[in-house]
């Protein structure tokens, strides 16, 4: 049975049909035959609005290797903890040692000249820009 609902009420004829069909509705109120939506809830299919879940993020074991940790610490030390993007110089918690040419794009993982310290804002900007470039290079483009 399809039910059209206006506001929180259904028409008397629909309510009567629902009562007749199920034979178990006992929530009709007064002489207007008003039934609350809650009584209909088990009969209304719920839309599944979930989207596909991303796979869990797994840390690349490279970033826990002694060689990377040594280079990361060296980059931080040499930058005196400051963002190395020209004109920035910010110091904050969570600074990121960044591969200038990302590993995904063939950047050398342990080449000191391919690493610099960045604040989170600049690192996020760079990541978004690099991702956009990668997407544009894919067949079919962005
Ligand atoms: Zn910065």
Image: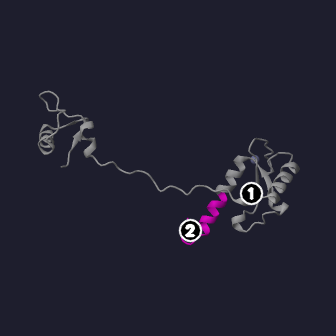
45 vs 83, nearest the viewer:
45
- Over which residues does the magenta segment extend? 129-142
Quadrant of the image occupied by residue 89? top right
Contact flag, marks 1 and 2 (Cβ < 8 Å) = no
Q: Which residue is drawn at 61% across and 69% down?
A: 137
**What element does badge 2 sit on?**
loop
Q: Which of 113 and 54 is in front in this view?
A: 54
Residue at image coords 54%, 71%: 140
Across and down, in percent, residue 94 comes to: 74, 44
How much space separates mark 1 and mark 2, taking CA atoms?
A: 31 Å
Residue, disc 1: 63
Q: Nearer the viewer, mark 1 or mark 2?
A: 1
Q: Position of residue 10 (x, y in %)?
A: 19, 38
Q: Mark 2 points at which residue?
A: 141
Q: Is residue 19 left or right of residue 70?
A: left
Residue visible at 75% across and 66% down? Answer: 107
Residue 85 at least partly seen:
no
Q: Which residue lies furthest to the top in this view?
A: 30
Q: Is 83 placed above or below 130 here?
A: above
Please state which of residues 63 and 24 is positioned toward the viewer in this rendering. Answer: 24
Residue 124 image offset from top left, x and y in percent? 67, 51
* 141 in the magenta segment: yes
Q: Is mark 1 on a helix, strand or loop?
A: helix
The vertical placement of 59 against 95, above or below, is below
Q: In this rendering, does residue 82 appear at all?
A: yes
């Amino acid at each position: 049975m399809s039910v059209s609902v206006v506001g929180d009420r259904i028409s008397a004829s629909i309510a009567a049909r629902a009562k007749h069909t199920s034979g178990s509705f006992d929530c009709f109120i007064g002489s207007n035959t008003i039934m609350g939506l809650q009584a209909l809830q088990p009969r209304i299919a719920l839309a599944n609005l979930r989207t596909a879940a991303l796979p869990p993020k797994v840390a690349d074991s490279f970033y826990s290797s002694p060689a990377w940790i040594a280079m990361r610490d060296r980059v931080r030390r040499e930058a005196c903890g400051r963002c190395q993007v020209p004109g920035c110089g910010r110091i904050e918690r969570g600074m990121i040692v960044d591969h200038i040419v990302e590993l995904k794009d063939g950047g050398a993982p342990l080449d000191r000249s391919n690493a610099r310290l960045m604040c989170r804002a600049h690192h996020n900007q760079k990541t978004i820009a690099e991702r956009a470039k990668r997407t544009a290079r894919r067949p079919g483009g962005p």
